[in-house]
């Protein structure tokens, strides 16, 4: 169990960042569900709950999600359910249970770059950017590739483009972590294939997506199979207690095929 | 640090440590229906309502409840007894350890979902684990209680 000596509840992001930087052992408090499983000794926990970061704002061009928004709010939000075939709510819906999703926050899930995260996989298949206090605004893909440093994620921005998306995952049991996650999208004609829980964090299969894009409206089983093989070739898979690397690769082939079929059927 | 919370419609001021979790804080107030189960945020035994939403008390820091409404099964006694009676009729509880969290989740579902299907019910209750029953009696009881027609 982690220990927390004091709590700061700043009123501004600048004040929150200042407290975070004061000591190496200071940390941001998100949902705290994963934090409590560890044994970190935190001097000052920076609580973001007074900063108004719990929101989902829908506009014609984008959907903005505040960092302290819970996964249950994401699951039930009308705007998110109506965008990209409800990709993000579908990804969030299988995470443990309703009570858990009322505790955990999207900001913590994304900032910590969890390998097992369903929401990161889904967000990666959309046109997603993140905003940080120090790092500014960047694409989610770029953020995931940067090493973790002291910063505060404030919001996630999903830029809206027309198209379809599908989510697939496999778990050993309903409330377990996934052993593999897949999100496929075709937005504004551009394909994206994101594979996560490898067990490492989600990554885009770029060459595979290019193959699908070249097919245009003439998608055939042969092209899909080529794209699937390209995807598992360019991504790496590993062993952990939930699955072996070999099993993950076979599962990835199946889940990518299913997700692509779902997107093609929606077109 | 001091917090002021409304527990089962009663305002109380409590002294808590920064890293205290609600499960312990509430049990210290004599609310023994709130139980520690897995301690890894998976089982739902510790379920309470925070501002009417089912939430894991084992994973919610107590200071975050400052100014908020907390409901445990002690605060929903009559409604909980009604549903517990249906559970008993269907033979749906054995040791009873998971029951308070389970009942709170069902009562939250009753408020949140309109005309749930069996699939909706099963999905909503994924976060409540029971080691004894195999869930069939509980599902029968919920469908009977909510008047779900097959």
Image (cartoon, coloured by chain):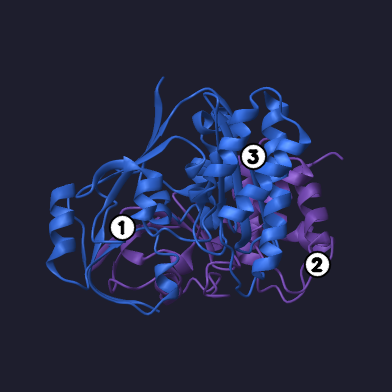
Chain colours: A blue, B purple
Q: Is mark 2 on a helix, strand or loop?
A: loop
Tag 3 subunit: B
Alpha carbon separation for disc pair 3 and 1:
28 Å
Height in image: A267 above or below A104? Answer: above
Q: What element carries label 3?
A: loop
Alpha carbon separation for disc pair 2 and 1:
38 Å
Residue farthest right in this picture: B150
Q: At x 67% / y 60%, what residue is drawn?
A: A249
Tag 1 subunit: B
Residue under label 1, please give it: B66
Q: Answer whether residue A58 is visible to the viewer in this image.
A: no
Height in image: B95 above or below B44? Answer: below
Mark 3 packing: few (<14 Cα in 10 Å), some, or many (20+)? few
Mark 2 packing: few (<14 Cα in 10 Å), some, or many (20+)? few
Q: At x 73% / y 74%, what residue is drawn?
A: B131
Q: CB of mark 3 within 8 Å of CB of mark 1? A: no
Residue under label 3, please give it: B113
Q: x%, y% of residue A267?
A: 67, 23
Q: Which of A122 and B83 is in front in this view?
A: A122
Q: At x 18% / y 48%, what residue is drawn?
A: A13
Tell me which numbered mark, 3 or 1, is placed earlier along the sequence.
1
Q: Which of marks 2 and 3 is in front?
A: 2
Q: What element carries label 1?
A: loop
In the image: residue A244, left or right of residue A206: right
Q: At x 64% / y 39%, what residue is drawn?
A: B113
Total tally of numbered discs in the picture: 3
Residue under label 2, please give it: B134
């Amino acid at each position: 169990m982690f220990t927390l000596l004091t709590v700061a509840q700043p009123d501004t992001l600048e004040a929150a960042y200042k407290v975070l930087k004061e000591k190496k052992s200071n940390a941001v408090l998100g949902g705290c569900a994963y934090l409590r499983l560890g044994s970190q000794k935190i001097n000052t926990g920076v609580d973001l709950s007074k900063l108004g970061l719990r929101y989902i704002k829908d506009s014609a061009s984008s959907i903005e999600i505040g960092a302290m928004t819970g996964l249950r709010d994401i699951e039930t939000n009308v705007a998110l359910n109506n965008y990209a075939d409800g990709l993000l709510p579908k990804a969030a819906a299988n995470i443990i249970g309703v009570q858990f999703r009322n505790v955990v926050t999207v900001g913590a899930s994304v900032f910590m770059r969890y390998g097992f995260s369903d929401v990161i996989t889904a967000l990666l298949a959309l046109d997603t950017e993140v905003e940080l206090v120090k790092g500014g605004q960047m694409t989610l893909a770029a953020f995931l590739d940067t090493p973790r440093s002291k910063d505060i994620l404030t919001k996630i921005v999903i830029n809206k483009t027309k198209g379809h998306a599908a989510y697939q995952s496999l778990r050993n049991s309903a409330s377990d972590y996934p052993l593999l996650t897949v999100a496929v999208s075709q937005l504004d004609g551009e394909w994206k294939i994101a594979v996560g829980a490898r067990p490492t964090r989600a990554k885009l299969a770029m060459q595979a997506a290019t193959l699908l894009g070249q097919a245009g409206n003439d998608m055939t089983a042969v092209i899909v199979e080529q794209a699937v093989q390209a995807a598992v070739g360019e991504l790496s898979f590993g062993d952990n207690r939930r699955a072996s690397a070999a099993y993950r690769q076979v599962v990835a082939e199946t889940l990518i095929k299913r997700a692509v079929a779902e997107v093609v059927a929606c077109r | 640090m001091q917090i002021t919370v409304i527990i089962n419609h009663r305002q109380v001021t409590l002294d808590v440590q920064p890293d205290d979790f609600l499960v312990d804080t509430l049990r210290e107030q004599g609310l023994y229906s709130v139980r520690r189960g897995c301690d890894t945020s998976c089982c739902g035994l510790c379920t309470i309502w925070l501002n009417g939403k089912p939430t894991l008390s084992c994973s919610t820091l107590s200071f975050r409840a400052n100014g908020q409404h907390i409901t445990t099964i002690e605060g929903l006694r009559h409604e909980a007894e009604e549903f517990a009676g249906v559970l008993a009729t269907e033979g749906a509880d054995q040791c009873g350890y998971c029951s308070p969290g389970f009942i709170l989740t069902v009562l939250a579902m009753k408020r949140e979902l309109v005309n749930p299907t069996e699939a909706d019910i099963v999905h909503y209750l994924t976060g409540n684990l029971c080691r004894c029953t195999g869930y069939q009696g509980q599902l029968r009881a919920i469908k009977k209680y909510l008047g779900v027609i097959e």
